[in-house]
Image (spheres, grey):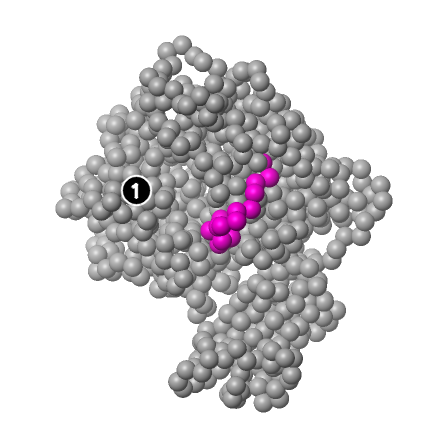
Amino acid sequence: MEKKKLATFLHGTLEAAIFHATTYTPSFPFNCIIVGKEKAAYVTIKLDQTKVSETSHKLDRIWNQTFRIRCAHSTSTMITITLKTRHSVLGMIQIPAQNLLNEATPHDGFFTLFTDKGKPNPKLKLQFRLHFRSAESDHNWGRDIKHGGFQGLESGVSFEQRSNCSVILYQDAHHRPSFRPPVYIDGLREVYRPRKLWEDVYRAIDGAKHLVYIAGWSLNPKMILIRDNETEIPHGKGVSIGDLLKQRAEEGVAVRIMLWDDETSLPIIKNKGLMRTHDEEALDYFKHTKVLCKLCPRLHNKFPTLFAHHQKTITTDTKPQLLSSSAQPNDGMIDEEVREIVSFIGGLDLCDGRYDTEEHSLFQTLNTDSHANDFYQINFDGASLHKGGPREPWHDVHACVMGDAAWDVLANFEQRWTKQCDPSLLFPFNKIPNLLHHTCHPSLDHTYNWNVQVFRSIDRISTRTLPDDSSVEHSIHEAYVETIRRAEKFIYIENQYFIGGCHIWEKDRHCGCKNLIPVEIALKVVSKIRSKERFAVYIVIPMWPEGVPESEPVQDILHWTRLTMSMMYKLIGEAIQESGESVNPRDYLNFFCLANREKKSIGEFVPPCSPQHTSHYWKAQMHRRFLVYVHSKLMIVDDEYILIGSANMNQRSMDGRRDTEIVIGCHQPEFIRNKRSHGEIHAYRMSLWYEHTGHTEELFSEPESVECVRKIRCIGEEMWSIYSGEEEVDMEGVHLVNYPVTVSMNGCVEDRVEGGGTFPDTSTLIRGKRSKFLPPIFTT
């Protein structure tokens, strides 16, 4: 194979310090609209056409602000620093990225700014310093958290890393009592006992004595948390979340609910809104009760209805260890009146269709308490239980945190409430006796062994408090990039979307999807290939984004997803060619999705009506198959660090100016210090893999190995053949299927030959299609 020289990158961190500018203002600055007296000035920094930083607006032109800008860009990138007022561009200076790579010393001094015609203006100068540190020279690069400890992000983030926390990790809203994954830990098979999320949510709310705070994208007050006949909380079976909250409020608990106001939901014309979030229904349900429910629009200067409050948190006070996996009956050491704060955070909304188990059934639960009154299927127009399945199975992940990080989740709620609601309605904590702010009771110490940091995507329009005098926080993106750069062995991702790195795409480079996550992953693999080390990346996404597959938004998102995949595989393919190895890029990077196919069973629900013949709904029903919708927002690195929360891997979630999001990053130092990576994160990943593959093997404990990669891909290939084949074959609880693309040795991505380039039972192009009407800001 002919070796190919791999393109060089500006890959690392650009530190830009903006100090001050001269007070001179040109009489006729270019692009200027003079309105009244002198305006406050500010400085922007762009990488090519993408703005990456902006100072505060100051009349005296003294900023003294420093920005740490993550870079994964071509060395042909142009860095543009511009001095502006609100109505005019005063001057600019451009610096080729290549200059920073070639200079050993920082670009530091008082620099003359230029007009738009390239003429220098000696009277207009700006003092700044630019210093670039490559990722590989960074002391964090190639060094995981076991060496020297990980202190968390230290700049651009509202909350510091907290120690002595407790974390519970959940998969799906519920699971069957028989679900006991046999997990390999240190070469031994042990039974992992995952907890049941919605039962724990019920326990936490039911056990609250003082407060219940809920921030959500959606909440259906009629939704039922407990539906299992074998539940350990029989008194909660069939109780709606709305009735539970009203009951707690009647008993004196301060119940505060903050929901995203979908401004397209207009009750006056009985319009449920584009997103069907039940926001107006919830507001009406809690009206004239003691529950305070507020609808908060995601205010934006340009697009008041486009973006969402997407955070999903529940915070309550509870008895210590009520939810701990190692909780024991009270032995008298803990006072019954002692309370602690507990916060839930993740991807699951309290609304329609989210209740599911590891089985992800399509047809067999339609006449049971699980889904008889919760039939959810929005991928087909006019779908209903009346016409039969398949329902849309839902795979998601969530977490519960206790300790100081739980207080940070609470602080996020209070900051948002204070910005958009009445702060006097918040509950005063000094009225809670025996409240543990720092969990320090001796009987609890052994379970509080996590370090946790809370990250956000948010701006000052939605919160009063942000770090470093900034107008926006995008610490979720920073946390993802930092964690990827520290990865040593493997990365495992589950996410509803996977889009980014548009500046390196083959086309549509100016669509605005600038987050670096996919590029960073690809460059991590490239670095490992060059150093001849094993590394593996597993990415699980939905077969297609939720919605009617042929619709323009779905096709648009598929288009962006394919461009992202192609960019990553191209970089990896080039690195393989440069190395001279005879391997396929899929030995390093693989995309998967989840699906199910069920044979008809005795006693199954028989619908009275049928979908229109030859429709996609009818085809899916006849072939007894459908996707399992992946709604997770999860990344695990080296079985040592986990990021989990509400943020999707797209620009909407990572930007900070679009959707508001919240995520926690967690690890257990004691396992890392003892050079054991088999803590709870490892057990959790193995449990997820068991759910998806039906397998648990010792080689799964070494995900970076090529043997493990090929084994997982082999399972995915076998199950795709069963799922997509003409013969009706039950998938028997194994849901992992390979994403239907092929990848050549040089990294070229193409649709699989069979199926005509469409997903089964649809006319939906796997590669998607760029919309002629939708602006990219809608779908990236």
Side of 671 relative to 251 (left or right): right
The percent coordinates of residue 17 (x first, y second) are 57, 74
Q: Residue furthest right?
A: 2
Q: Is 457 rendered above or below residue 89? A: above
**Of 466 and 432, the residue lying toward us:** 466
Task: Identify the residue at horizontal 54%, vertical 31% (top origin).
Answer: 763
Give the prevailing secondary structure in the magenta stretch: loop
Q: Where does the N terminus fall, quadrant-wise?
A: top right
Q: Residues within 10 Å of mark 1 (few under 14, many from 20)?
A: some
Please report the residue visible at 33 percent of the width from the left and 32 percent of the height from the top: 199
Image coordinates for residue 15, horizontal then vertical, percent:
60, 68
Q: Which is more toward the observer, 312 or 720?
A: 720
Where residue 736 sits: x, y (%)?
56, 28
Residue type at mark 1 is Lys
Is 776 colored magenta in this rendering?
A: yes
Q: Residue shown at 64%/52% (left/top)?
A: 507
The residue depicted at 29 percent of the width and 57 percent of the height is 417
SS of the residue at dot 1? loop
User: Relative to residue 43, is residue 709 drawn left or right?
Assistant: right
Above or below 473: residue 44: below
Residue 280 in which image quadrant: top left
Which corner quadrant of the image does residue 188 belong to? top right
Residue with the mark numbered 1 = 272
Given residues 8 and 375, the one toward you in this image is 375
Query: Magenta span covers which residues?
Result: 766-780
